[in-house]
Amino acid sequence: MHVPDGYLDAATTAGTAAVAAAGVALALRGARRELDERTAPMAGLTAAFVFAVQMMNFPIAYGTSGHLIGGALTAVLVGPWTAVLCMTVVLLVQALVFADGGLTALGTNVTLMGLVAVGVGYGAFRLLRAVLPAGRTGVLAAAGVGAFLSVPVAALVFVGLFGLGGVADVSLTSVAAAMGGVHLLIGLGEAAITVAVLGAVLAVRPDLVRGARHLQRATTLAPRPATAGRPAAPTAVDAR
Amino acid sequence: MGAGHGHGAGLASMYVPGASPVHRLEPHTKLVAVLAFALVVVLTPVHAGWAPWAYAGFLALLLGVAAVAGIRPGRLLRGLVVEVPFVFFALLLPVVSRGPRTEVLGLSLSESGLAAGGSILAKATLSVLAATLLAATTDPRALLRGLDRLRLPAVLVQILTFMIRYADVVGGELRRMKVARESRGFRARRVGALKVLGPAAGSLFIRSYERGERVHLAMLSRGYTGRLPTGPVAVVGSRSWAAALSLPLAAVAVLGAGSLLG
């Protein structure tokens, strides 16, 4: 659901572009804390993953299928700032290379799918993670709810923007009801896919899930070094 | 949400190699030109009586550029596929809009909603066509160079570079997993298929992340300090800018003629 050119008037488009630019600037600073100098290669590969997984079709129900938008999932996996950068880069490539989403509407799309979806998804995830019992189930439930909420909230923000600067005189409540209703269903799909993917990563490499770092102490295995390939320090047992 | 994004053929699928004058323009001048053209299209007043004529003029300009660039109309039409979800939204507008109603084929539709829906469709279509022309005449790596020259933050350009470099690699892994699944008789039909597809996407993430770690280490060992060296940049003369900006300037002329004559 990329907003094309011409849906919102010039003032609203410029406003969302300014919001998006400020958000991306903040994310560029924040991502350095999450990934230090690895920012560019890691965020680039994560963006390539988001881009690829958006091509994957998941069956939802009654013959319909959906694909992941991925804001909440990426935020839980690599942290919210890096997730904002990944979504921004994916949206930029989709707009420039595939004409998917308008060029002048890029700021609007980054605001909706980068800032709002990631912010709401990750915010709800952190809130619920604090409340729910710690553990795999708690993390998955929190991420699922975050992913679910991120979609209809982003849709409602779009309806709000359309009310501010839309080019048609519509009754906002009916548009909000229609968009909200459809996106509640899409949100359910997003939540199901997010939980399935996150559960799989947690089972194999829990150390890669940034949002589940607090679980790591429970494992008896030595954590893998952050950058693979560094030789492990010899231990007393090895030095026999 | 429908059928995914349909970018299955990879990042380079939109690019049509060629040596036309449009292909040879510097990428950053083309980026500015297409963005300015989209701005002019967006700024066209919705409810003016002459708006349809302006849209026709813009379309003629784009078709002229496509002819110069040697891009076939079929290629342009393929670019329009991405617009489909929002066509439904535009079709809904005449039904839900307020204001004076009119009868069309037995349906009671809002006049302002018809104008708004029609102009949204026209504007979105024109700007998708312009962006499709840009993608068809500019290699993705050249687009990156253009964004770099337009002073996009260096870290963002680097992230984009890695994404464009590895999108087809990661997409290829996804495709191989799909072939492997389907050759074992897997068909994604019910929600239960998530048990198979979830781990597939999860392992795709792990492979992507680990590949990122390897790439990063390989770069560190070659002296990477967080910046990518860039070669000398060619000076772009005013003639090249004039050629690129002729498209948005012609669009402004169409807009001006419309408001004067209309």
Image: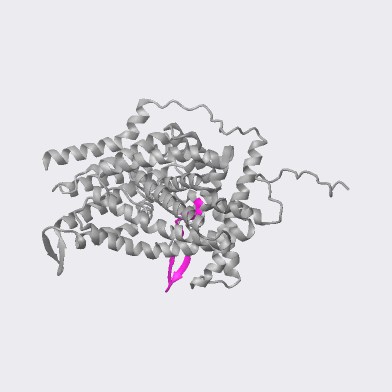
Of B223 and B232, nearer the camera is B223
What residue lies at 88% left-to-right and 48% top-to-bottom? Answer: A240
Of A226 and A57, nearer the camera is A226
What residue lies at 58% left-to-right and 67% top-to-bottom? Answer: B181
Compared to residue B60, the image places residue A121 above or below, namely: below
Instruction: Report the quarter where the N terminus of chain A lies.
Output: bottom left
Compared to residue A240, the image places residue B203 above or below, namely: below
Taking the image as drawn, is residue B10 in sight?
yes
- Residue B151 location (% of width, % of height): 43, 32
- Residue B220 location (% of width, % of height): 65, 36
Question: How was this image coloured?
Answer: one colour
- Residue B256 location (% of width, % of height): 18, 37
Image-based side of A88 in relation to A207, left or right? left
- Residue B255 location (% of width, % of height): 20, 40
The magenta region covers A58-75
The verdict on residue A71 being magenta is yes
What residue lies at 27% left-to-right and 49% top-to-bottom? Answer: B123
Of B100 and B222, nearer the camera is B100
Taking the image as drawn, is residue B25 in sight?
no
Compared to residue B47, the image places residue B22 above or below, namely: above
